[in-house]
């Protein structure tokens, strides 16, 4: 796919910072600080999603997985191929699979899985798989453009605070 079909000059830093604000909302709600946005080719924010671990302790309630379920129920894969998923942290293997199966054309993330794993350690609420989303997408039959890590220090700030308190 031609990236011009997706892009139309989107300001990635603007939208990734918006995903950080969604992650901060999750943190303020007492949840894991992850947030995601779905943006169409014209720059319209279609969906936002905070992490959904609480209230039921859903280990699959990652912001990316939940927003992609919602997106695939609302939009066709052809439409989603022209959309960008902005996420405060790199999609894990589950979330990368969800992005692939939903048909997303581009993923832009803040915090890398490797850095997240270094921050969280072996925490039972976030057993991080250090498997880059690019590796997951490379195993597929269609291309998914990946940009990231982007503004990683900003992305890490919420996690440093949250996981430090979890460990103390």
Image (spheres, helix red, strand yellow):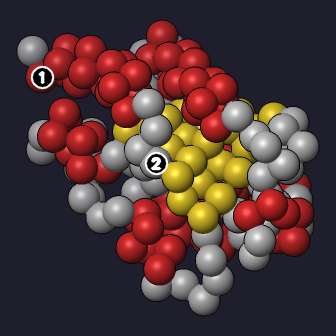
Q: Which mark is residue 148?
A: 2
Q: Position of residue 145 (x, y in %)?
A: 60, 64
Q: Position of residue 30 (x, y in %)?
A: 43, 16
**Rendered residue at 46%/38% (across/down):** 150
Q: Nearer the viewer, residue 47 or 57?
A: 47
Q: Secondary structure at mark 1?
A: helix
Is the residue 153 above or below the residue 114 in the image? Answer: above
Query: Where, by quadrant of the figure, is residue 106 drawn?
Result: bottom right
Describe residue 34's horizontal placement relative to residue 120 as left or right.
right
The quarter of the image holding the N terminus is: bottom right
Q: Which mark is residue 167?
A: 1
Marks 1 and 2, how far apart at CA: 27 Å
Q: Which mark is residue 106?
A: none
Is the residue 105 above or below the residue 17 in the image? Answer: below
**Rendered residue at 80%/61% (across/down):** 4
Q: Nearer the viewer, residue 43 or 72?
A: 43
Residue 55 visible in the current orientation:
no
């Amino acid at each position: 796919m031609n990236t011009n079909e997706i892009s139309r000059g989107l300001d990635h830093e603007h939208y990734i910072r918006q995903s950080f604000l969604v992650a901060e909302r999750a943190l303020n709600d007492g949840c894991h600080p992850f947030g995601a946005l779905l943006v169409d080719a014209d720059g319209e924010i279609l969906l936002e999603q905070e992490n959904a671990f609480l209230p039921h302790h859903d280990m699959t309630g990652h912001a990316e997985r939940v927003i992609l379920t919602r997106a695939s129920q609302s939009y066709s894969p052809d439409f989603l191929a022209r959309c960008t998923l902005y996420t405060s942290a790199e999609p894990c293997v589950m979330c990368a699979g969800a992005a692939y199966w939903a048909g997303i054309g581009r993923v832009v993330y803040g915090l890398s899985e490797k850095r997240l794993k270094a921050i969280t350690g072996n925490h039972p609420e976030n057993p991080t798989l250090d498997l880059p989303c690019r590796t997951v997408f490379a195993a597929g039959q269609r291309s998914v453009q990946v940009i990231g890590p982007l503004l990683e220090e900003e992305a890490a700030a919420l996690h440093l605070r949250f996981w430090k308190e979890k460990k103390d």
